[in-house]
Amino acid sequence: MAQADRSVPRRYPVLLGALTFLFACRVLGQFVVGIADIAWLPPFERWYSGLMPYAALLPVQLAMIAVMLKIVWDFARGYGLFLRLGPRVGTILLWFSYLYALAMVARYVVTMLMKPELRWFTGTIPIWFHFVLAAFIYTLGRYHVRDRSAGGQAP
C-alpha cells in the first residue's frame, strides 16, 4: 500500500532523535562500565536499579532503542507506521507520559527519603533516564494530538 508523504515539522525528528541518542548513550555507558573500569564514568551500581536482572534488561533496552530508531526514521522521512497512530493513540501516549513522569518524581522522592546520600545523579541515573523516555513518549503523543490533527492530515 502506497503511503502519502507528510510534512512533519522538523522539530519532531530532531527532538525524538536527540532523546533516542541520550537513551542509547545511557545504555552504552552502563554496558561499558559493566565490562571495564572507566574511571570518569560512574560505577555500574549507579547506572542500575536492580529491579530487573541486567542479562534481561540489556536486550529490552536494545529493543527499545530499535523501536525508537524506527519512530525517528518514520518522522524523518515523513511516512511510516508511527505517523499513522492518530489523535486517540496520541492522547493515550500523552496521558501515559504524564503518569510515567509522575511515577519517576515519586520514585525520586522515595529514594531521597530512604537514601538521602544519593542526591541528584549519585545513584539516580535510572530515574533521570526514565524522564528521557517519558519525554520521548510525550513528543510522539503530542505530534499525533496537536500537530497532526491541526494540519488536518488524515491517516
Image (cartoon, helix red, strand yellow):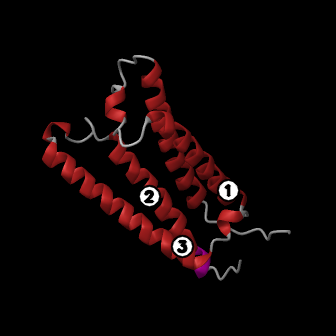
Q: Secondary structure at mark 1?
A: helix
State the residue at coordinates (53%, 47%). Answer: 20
x and y percentages locating residue 28 in the rendered image: 50, 32
Q: CA distance from mark 3 to mark 1?
A: 18 Å
Mark 3 vs mark 1: give the one in front: 3
Residue to which mark 3 is pinned? 90
x and y percentages locating residue 148 in the rendered image: 61, 75
Which residue range is magenta in the image?
Answer: 146-150
The reply to whether the magenta stretch includes residue 147 is yes
- Three-letter amino acid code at the position of disc 2: Ala
| Dot placed on the residue nearer the N-terminal end, 2 or 3 | 3
Q: Which corner quadrant holds the N terminus?
A: bottom right
Residue to which mark 2 is pinned? 135
**Lateral position of residue 12 relative to residue 126, left or right:** right
Q: Is residue 146 visible?
A: no
Q: Nearer the viewer, residue 77 or 44?
A: 44
Q: CA distance from mark 2 to mark 3?
A: 13 Å
